[in-house]
Amino acid sequence: MLNIKNKFPEGSNPFSLFYSGKSCYVMARFCLEATFWDFYVPGFLLMQQSLENLIKSCLKQKNIGWKQENGGYGKKGHEFKRLIGLGKDIGFFKEKIINRTDFLSLLKELEDGYNLQRYGASGHFIKSHEKMMDLFDEMVFIFVTGFTTLVEPRKNEQLERLVALPIPLYLEKTFKRKLKQSFIFIDVIPLDS
C-alpha cells in the first residue's frame, strides 16, 4: 500500500503542497501545449490544482488556515478569491497578485471550470490560450519564487533545488516552448532507465 499522507496538523505539509503544485504545473503545461483536444480539459484541471496547491503551500507556510466557518474545508477551500484574500498580508501576494485583474480573471475561469468538472459536466471557458499560458507561467513563477522567501534561509543550492522544476532532459525543449519565465530545471530520470 502506498501511503503519502504526512504527519502535519490538518494533513497538509507546505512542502508537499508546494512540490505537488510544481508537478501539476509541469503536467498542465505539457497537456495545454499539446495540439490534441483530449488533453485540454485535464490540462485545465492540472492548472487549477497547480495554482491551488501553490497558494495553499504559501498559506500553510505562514500558518494561515483555510477551513470554513463550520470547521470543514468544502467548496470554499477551492475558491481562489477567498484563498488569495487569506494571503493578503503575505508580501508578494499583496505586491504581485491581488491587484492583477488579469490574474484574478484567469483564476475565476479556472475555478468555474473545476466546479463544472467536479459536479459532472466538462468544460472550461478560457478567453485566450496564448495569454492564458503567459499568465499561468507568470503566476506559477511568482508563487514558486515567493514560497522560497517564506522558508527559513537555506544555502543557494538548496534554494535552487526548491525552485527547480522536475523535467526529463529529453522533454525540456518542448516544455520551454514559448516560456517567458526564468525557471531552473532538474533532470528527472525516466522510470524505464
Image (spheres, helix red, strand yellow):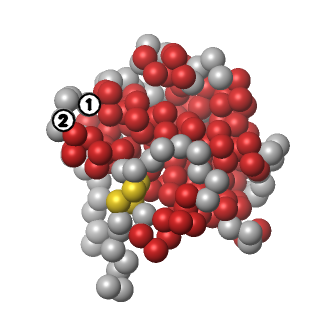
Residue tagged 1: 151
Q: Is residue 53 above or below residue 77?
A: below
Which picture quadrant has residue 81?
A: top right
Residue tagged 2: 154
Residue nearest the viewer, comparing 78 with 36:
36
Instruction: Identify the secondary structure beneath mark 2.
Output: loop
Instruction: Identify the secondary structure beneath mark 1.
Output: loop
Q: Residue at x 39, y 56 (%)?
A: 185
Horizontal and vertical percent position of residue 144: 42, 39
Residue type, numbered disc 1: Val
Horizontal and vertical percent position of residue 73: 48, 35
Q: Is residue 9 above or below residue 174?
A: above
Judged left or right of residue 146, residue 159 is left
Which picture quadrant has residue 122?
A: bottom right
Judged left or right of residue 30, residue 12 is left
Q: Residue at x 64, y 54 (%)?
A: 178
Which numbered disc, 2 or 1, marks the residue closer to the eye?
Answer: 2
Q: Is residue 52 above or below residue 31?
A: above
Which quadrant holds the C terminus? bottom left
Horizontal and vertical percent position of residue 14: 32, 39
Circle 2/circle 1 CB separation < 8 Å: yes
Residue at the outermost bottom position: 192
Q: Residue at x 27, y 72 (%)?
A: 1
